[in-house]
Image: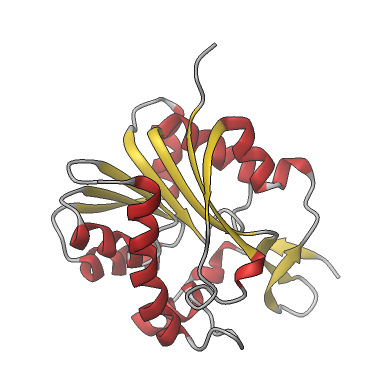
Amino acid sequence: MSLYYYKDMFKVDNLEEAKNIILAEEVQGGDHRQRWERETTYMQSLFAEGLGDLNGKTVLDFGCGIGRLSKALVEKYDCHVLGVDISPDMRRMAQEYVGSDRFSVISYEMFCALAETGSLQTDCAIAVYVLQHVYDPAHDIGLLEKAVRDKLLVLNLKHRAVPVIDSENGAKTFYLDEQPEPRADVGLLLAEHFEQQRQLELAADKISVVDKHWCRIYGKKESK
């Protein structure tokens, strides 16, 4: 069996399909509609606890999807949010879903180009359920370090969940890697690039299978 990274896993035709793949159904957590309502409201409280007052700030939503959390941010704060997503379908829906002049969305390729040259600077960033999926965590975390001036909130699985396609039968799934090599270990990589400030306690009635997740706040490392 040969597995290949499958970025088109996030190719969708409509809003319901998008919501279903962003927050998939879980036995303990319910379907995507239940999770969407429960977790989105809860994430607002985590943002307030971990990032503080975001009024007047610019926030990068890395892996924004259709803008679920970007919408929550612009509704709660007088902030500007820049979404980044690998999926053209998600980006297309995001602008309409968020529905705010304080929200913009760019492609992953544009983010890489701007961050690499230091042309992109935001006050804070969020990466929720995304670094566990990316093709090259070391690359993306390195660019986040360049793009974020202050704080980064990361909610992640304790293991990787990589979108793959089986070249033999065309099956699409998430490959679970519970012992990733150092270059793919999100926690280790974040510690290399950022200073961990605190770990937020997650509520078991809000985040399903809570013991398989962590949520941490990172800050810029002091220059030597």
Q: Quadrant of the N terminus?
A: bottom right
Q: Quadrant of the C terminus?
A: top right
Whether residue 121 is visible: yes
Residue 158 location, quadrant = bottom right
In front: 93, or 122?
122
Residue 103 location, quadrant = bottom left
**Left or right, 9 with reference to 33:** right
- The answer to whether 196 is drawn above or below residue 70 in the figure is above
Residue 17 appears at what percent x and percent y? 43, 82
In front: 34, or 53?
53
Model colouring: secondary structure
Residue 177 appears at what percent x and percent y? 76, 61
Whether residue 13 is visible: no
- The answer to whether 49 is drawn above or below residue 58 in the figure is below
**Left or right, 192 with reference to 128:** right
Q: Residue at horizontal 47%, vertical 75%?
A: 206
Residue 174 appears at what percent x and percent y? 67, 70
- Count the labels in the image: 0
**Left or right, 26 with reference to 65:** right
- The answer to whether 208 is drawn above or below residue 123 in the figure is below
Residue 191 appears at what percent x and percent y? 62, 36
Q: Residue at horizontal 40%, vertical 64%?
A: 65
- The answer to whether 171 is drawn above or below residue 146 in the figure is below
**Left or right, 25 with reference to 81:** right
Q: Residue furthest top?
A: 224
Q: Residue at horizontal 25%, vertical 70%?
A: 97
Q: Residue at horizontal 77%, vertical 80%?
A: 169
In front: 110, or 212?
212
